[in-house]
Amino acid sequence: MTGEGRRAELAAALSDVNDRIGRACAAAGRPADEVTLVAVTKTYPASDVVLLTGLGVTDVGENKDQDAGPKAELARAEGATPRWHFIGQLQRNKARSVVRYADVVESADSVRLVEALARAAAGRSEPLDVLVQVSIDGDPARGGAAGDDLWRVSDSVAAADTLRLGGVMAVAPMDWDPDRAFATLRELSERLVITHPGASVISAGMSGDLEAAIRHGATHVRIGTSLLGMRNPLR
C-alpha cells in the first residue's frame, strides 16, 4: 500500500475510534477531552507512527524494548515526537534502555523494578512518569501488583526523585466481565489518590472494551487493532 493509501486507512480508523471514545464519554457524562488515546503500534513500522502523529495522535504505546527504541529513533528522524508509553512487562535489566525514549512507563509492578527505573532515570531532564500496573485477578503470570504490593510499589515510585507517580494501569482479565474489572480498578485508583493526590491517571481499555473502561473512569485507552487494523505486521 502507498503512503497516501495507508494514511487514508489510518485516518478513517482514527475517526472511528475517536467517535467511539466520544460516544462512550457522552454516555458516561464525561467530556471527551478527559480521555487520551494511546495508539499501540507494536509490530507496526515507524512510518505508521509518523502518519498517526500527522493525523493528530499525541501518544504512542509499545511493549517490546528491542522494537520501541529503534522505532522511536526512526520516527524522530522524520519529525514525529509523540509521547511514548512503554506498556509491556519490563525486566529490570531493560530499565536503562527504556528510559532513553519512553516518557511514560505503564508497567511498574515491583519495588525492585521501580528502583531500577529510578536509577536509570537519574540523567533525565525531568522525572519519568510511571504508572503502577495492577493485577486485577492476582495472577502473577500476567504481571501487575496485587494486594499490599500495589501500595508498596506506589509508595516507592512517589518516593523517588527521578520518577513521578501518575496513577494505575490494568488489563481486564479475559475471564472477567470488563465492567467488573474496571470498576475494581477505579476503586483502587480512588484509594491511591487519597494518599497520592496527583496520581489520577487510569490507563484501561483496549479495542474490545474501551467503552467499559471509559464508563469506569479511564483517562487513557490503549488502542491497537481498531486503529492499525490486521494488515501484515513487521513479523
Image (tube, rainbow, N blue to C red):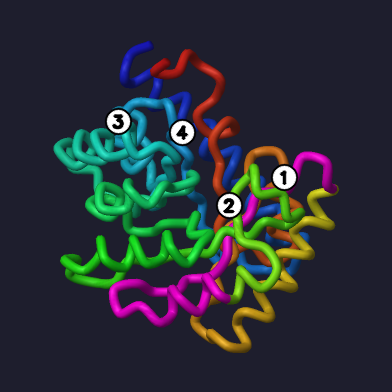
- Image check: 157 left or right of 31? left
- Image check: 24 left or right of 75? right
Residue at the far front in the pictured view: 112
Asked whether the residues under the numbered discs 3 and 1 touch, taking CB atoms below 8 Å apart as contact, a structural biologist would say no
In space, the residues marked 2 and 3 are separated at their CA atoms by 21 Å
- Image check: 26 left or right of 162? right
Mark 4 belongs to which amino acid?
Ala
Give the quarter of the image for residue 209.
top right
**Residue 112: percent from the left, percent from the top?**
43, 63
- Image check: 102 left or right of 107? left
On the image, numbered disc 1 is attached to which residue? 209
**Residue 152: percent from the left, percent from the top?**
56, 75
For marks 1 and 2 on the same chain, the one whose residue lies earlier in the sequence: 1
Mark 3: give few (<14), some (14-19) or many (20+) Cα within 10 Å. many
For marks 3 and 1 on the same chain, the one whose residue lies earlier in the sequence: 3
Asked whether the residues under the numbered discs 4 and 1 touch, taking CB atoms below 8 Å apart as contact, a structural biologist would say no
Q: Nearer the viewer, residue 129 or 138?
A: 138
Membership of 213 in magenta stretch? no
Mark 1 belongs to which amino acid?
Asp
Mark 2 belongs to which amino acid?
Val
On the image, numbered disc 3 is attached to which residue? 46
**Residue 167: percent from the left, percent from the top?**
53, 70
On the image, numbered disc 4 is attached to which residue? 11
On the image, numbered disc 2 is attached to which residue? 221
Q: Nearer the viewer, residue 192 or 55?
A: 192
In space, the residues marked 1 and 2 are separated at their CA atoms by 9 Å
For marks 2 and 3 on the same chain, the one whose residue lies earlier in the sequence: 3
In space, the residues marked 4 and 3 are separated at their CA atoms by 16 Å
Give the quarter of the image for residue 77.
top left
Mark 2: give few (<14), some (14-19) or many (20+) Cα within 10 Å. many
